[in-house]
Image (cartoon, grey):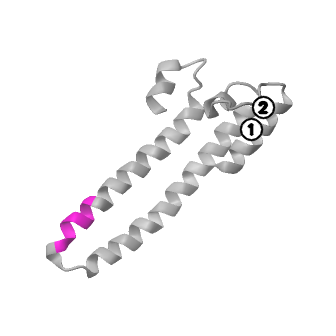
Amino acid sequence: IAVTDLICYWLWCQLGCSAYMPFLSDFGLQMPTSRIFVIGNSIGAILLFLWFSHVVIARASFIRTIPFEERASHRLGQLSSVLAVVFFVIGLVSVGQCPWDRNFFTHLIFL
């Protein structure tokens, strides 16, 4: 994800846009940064989801070793972290798919 942002920022500056703090979602507005931004964020979201699935499996095996009385709080933490990552992955992909100049309100929902 960081490599995508750096490439998009470099292209953004090469196009003559202001180098001072562009919004990340601005990279999805014009070619060639828009295609790189969408593809990079989509690949980054998929990789993040795959990596986190390994974390969930490791945590589940750890939770099984904890005494039964203490498992509820750990399972609640597991569920909340899974939901947070799922929402983050959906938002990461959707920000690139819904640029603010075409789908402003949809973009704000996923931002």
> Label 1 belongs to which residue?
8
Of residue 53 and residue 20, the one placed in the foreground of this image is 20
Percent position of residue 40, x then y: 67, 45
Q: Are marks 1 and 2 in contact (CB under 8 Å)?
A: yes
Percent position of residue 29, x then y: 68, 25
- The residue at 73%/30% (across/down) is 20
From this view, report whether residue 63 is shown above or below residue 75: below
- The residue at 54%/55% (across/down) is 48
Label 1 neighbour load within 10 Å: few <14, some 14-19, many 20+: many
Type of amino acid at the residue the image marks with label 2: Trp
Q: Is residue 96 left or right of residue 32?
A: left
The magenta stretch spans which residues?
70-76
Type of amino acid at the residue the image marks with label 1: Cys
Name the image quarter holding residue 18.
top right
- The residue at 59%/25% (across/down) is 99
Name the image quarter holding residue 30.
top right
Q: Is residue 58 left or right of residue 24?
A: left
Give the Cα separation between the discs numbered 1 and 2.
6 Å
From this view, report whether residue 93 is shown above or below residue 84: above
Q: Is residue 84 left or right of residue 45?
A: left
Instruction: Single out the residue that lies furthest toward the front.
Output: 20
Determine the main secondary structure of the stretch shown in magenta: helix
Q: Secondary structure at mark 1?
A: helix
Q: Is residue 73 highlighted in magenta?
A: yes
Q: What mark, if any, has residue 12 been given in the picture?
A: 2
